[in-house]
Image: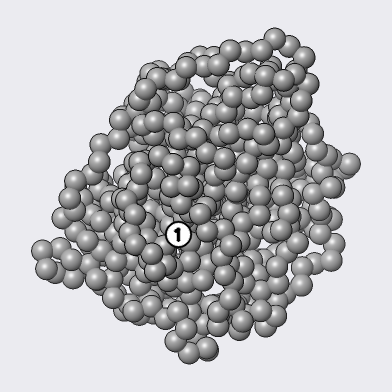
């Protein structure tokens, strides 16, 4: 595959995206909300400390093949250096904790909610029974507990994560730091033991100089919150010292609410070996990679054979159609990890198995649906107004349910600062999410093909609960359809403005499953819907 084709496949072929249009023009300045003057900036946190592994959640079970523990979301003060403490909400007092299990294991987790508000525990990327998904209708009240228990079946190996998913409360909880990693290891690892592996959870925070999480602004709601403090495993620009020639496996989670990561490693080529659902069939070399909120990537890179050199893994600017006042950091290169080669012997190159895995293409669909993502300003006419026609077909029948009931942002206030949210509806098929509405109905085991259309001026990462999908083809704006050059199992994929994608998927478990934009604020303002699988 040519490099140009790969970059187009990963949506990096058109980085100079337009931010013009009626919606942007109407919002610019009108909903601008000045950030608090006393914000903590990146320079306030020590940088360059050795990269720390993710703190582990302890397995309380002595039974082989079973992981049993308790997760307690609660308020905690975390030292940030120079006497400063960040007042966060964390699971078990840990920043980005890790649960590590194997395929075939039973995961047995009790959630004990010590927050002052309801929460859930959503297992992002893990196909689970619907009752274990942690959806908003299964919220756990303050002071209450809930039991999550399921088997990690064959094929579930990969890097996943967990985070809260309560109705109209997710944005606040994510902004306070609630997230963790779930690593499901395969029964047999095909990668050579010489490969050095590191898990990286990328998150961001916005703190006041007193260490409090700053409230959401109007720009946060419109664009997705991007905190000024960019962290890797809870650290600022950590350092990794390795021998020259080391083959690194870097497994990343973008746990940010709205920030996109356009990754490059200085003077190196990256090799993609896995995505949300695990290993892909063959390594894909690339110069850069876009990781949207919610996505995971599995990368290999052979570090330079030169000793005593430094190389920066960084996120480069990416234009995603920002609305309103634009923060300065959007135009800046954001360092993530500094890699240093030691004065030591050179490690030899590592040979990879071919293939890494096998991905069976899903067959012809029994169901075809259309999913349209739009942004609407109710008081500015019909700009970007969706058709409201899901155009689903199943033997000639339409599986569209519910009525158009957008929840206008202007009528709702934020639960963390009382500020009025901007008057924008983020919609799927012309409607905002409602807890009691079902947009589509389907059947267990049937192959479905969804044509997802981003009919808006800004990027949206599209996420599906309960299963993984394969990207079959993409179409940029007025261009022709292009078949995907290779297959991967995904649960989150980015759609650039006016881009279309054909996704094929099969739901293996019955129940009500969500699909939504994984910019947390857009999801909370309505860009989410439900499919009922029987």
Q: Quadrant of residue 123?
A: top left
Residue 75 visible, this angle: no
Residue 104 visible, this angle: yes
In this view of the protein, which residue sits in the foreground, 179 or 357?
357
- Whole-percent x and y of residue 127? 34, 42
In this view of the protein, which residue sits in the foreground, 376 or 271?
271
Vertical relation: 460 (above or below) 110: below
- Whole-percent x and y of residue 61? 46, 23
In this view of the protein, which residue sits in the foreground, 393 or 320?
320
Q: Which residue lies furthest to the top in this view?
A: 345
| Residue at the image position 39 percent from the left and 45 percent from the top | 490
Vertical relation: 119 (above or below) 68: below
| Residue at the image position 54 percent from the left and 48 percent from the top | 290
Q: In this view, does 169 lie to the left or right of 211?
A: left
**Quadrant (top left/top right/bottom left/bottom right) for the N terminus:** top left
Q: What element carries label 1?
A: strand
- Whole-percent x and y of residue 8? 46, 51
- Whole-percent x and y of residue 390? 28, 71
Vertical relation: 263 (above or below) 216: above
Tell me the residue that label 1 is attached to: 495
Q: Residue furthest right?
A: 82
Q: Which residue lies furthest to the left in this view?
A: 395
**Which colour assignment does the render follow?**
one colour
Q: In which quarter of the image is residue 90?
A: top right
Vertical relation: 533 (above or below) 479: above
**Quadrant (top left/top right/bottom left/bottom right) for the C terminus:** bottom left
* Dot 1 crowding, Cα within 10 Å, few <14, some 14–19, many 20+: many
Q: In this view, does 30 lie to the left or right of 84?
A: left
| Residue at the image position 52 percent from the left and 82 percent from the top | 377
| Residue at the image position 45 percent from the left and 59 percent from the top | 495
């Amino acid at each position: 595959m040519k490099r140009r084709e790969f970059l187009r496949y990963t949506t990096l072929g058109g980085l100079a995206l337009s931010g013009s249009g009626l919606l942007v023009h109407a919002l610019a300045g009108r909903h601008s909300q000045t950030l608090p003057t006393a914000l903590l900036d990146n320079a306030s946190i020590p940088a360059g400390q050795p990269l720390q592994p993710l703190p582990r959640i302890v397995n309380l079970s002595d039974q082989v093949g079973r992981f049993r523990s308790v997760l307690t979301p609660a308020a905690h003060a975390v030292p940030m250096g120079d006497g400063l403490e960040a007042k966060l909400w964390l699971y078990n007092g840990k920043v980005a904790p890790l649960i590590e299990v194997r395929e075939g294991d039973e995961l047995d987790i009790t959630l004990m909610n010590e927050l002052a508000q309801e929460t859930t525990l959503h297992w992002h990327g893990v196909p689970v029974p619907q009752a274990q998904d942690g959806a908003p209708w299964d919220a756990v009240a303050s002071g209450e507990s809930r039991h999550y228990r399921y088997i990690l079946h064959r094929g579930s190996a990969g890097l996943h994560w967990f985070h809260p998913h309560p109705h109209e409360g997710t944005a606040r909880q994510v902004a306070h730091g609630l997230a963790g990693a779930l690593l499901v290891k395969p029964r047999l690892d095909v990668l050579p033991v010489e490969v050095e592996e590191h898990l990286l959870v990328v998150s961001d925070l916005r703190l006041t100089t007193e260490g409090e999480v700053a409230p959401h602004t109007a720009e946060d709601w419109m664009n997705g919150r991007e905190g000024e403090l960019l962290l890797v495993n809870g650290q600022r620009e950590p350092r990794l010292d390795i021998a020259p020639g080391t083959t690194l496996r870097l497994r990343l989670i973008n746990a940010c609410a709205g920030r996109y990561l356009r990754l490059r490693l200085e003077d190196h080529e990256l090799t993609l070996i896995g995505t949300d659902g695990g290993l892909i069939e063959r390594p894909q070399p690339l110069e850069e990679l876009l990781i949207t909120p919610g996505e995971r990537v599995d990368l290999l890179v052979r570090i330079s054979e030169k000793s005593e050199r430094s190389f920066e893994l960084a996120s480069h600017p990416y234009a995603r159609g920002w609305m309103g006042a634009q923060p300065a950091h959007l135009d800046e290169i954001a360092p993530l990890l500094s890699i240093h080669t030691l004065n030591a012997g050179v490690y030899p190159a590592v040979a990879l198995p071919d293939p890494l895995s096998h991905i069976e293409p899903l067959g012809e669909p029994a169901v075809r649906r259309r999913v349209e993502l739009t942004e609407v300003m109710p008081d500015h006419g019909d700009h970007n107004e969706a058709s409201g026609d899901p155009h689903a077909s199943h033997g000639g029948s339409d599986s569209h349910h519910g009525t158009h009931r957008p929840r206008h942002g202007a009528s709702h206030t934020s639960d963390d600062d009382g500020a009025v949210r901007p008057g924008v509806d983020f919609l799927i098929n012309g409607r905002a999410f409602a807890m009691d509405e079902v947009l589509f109905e389907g059947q267990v085991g049937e192959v479905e093909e969804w044509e997802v259309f981003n009919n808006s001026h800004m990027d949206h990462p599209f996420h599906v609960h309960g299963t993984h999908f394969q990207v079959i083809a993409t179409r940029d704006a007025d261009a022709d359809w292009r078949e995907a050059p290779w297959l991967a199992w995904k649960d989150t994929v980015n759609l650039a403005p006016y881009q279309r994608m054909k996704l094929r998927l099969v739901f293996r478990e019955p129940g009500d499953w969500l699909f939504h934009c994984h910019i947390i604020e857009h999801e909370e303002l309505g860009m989410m819907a439900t499919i009922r699988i029987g």
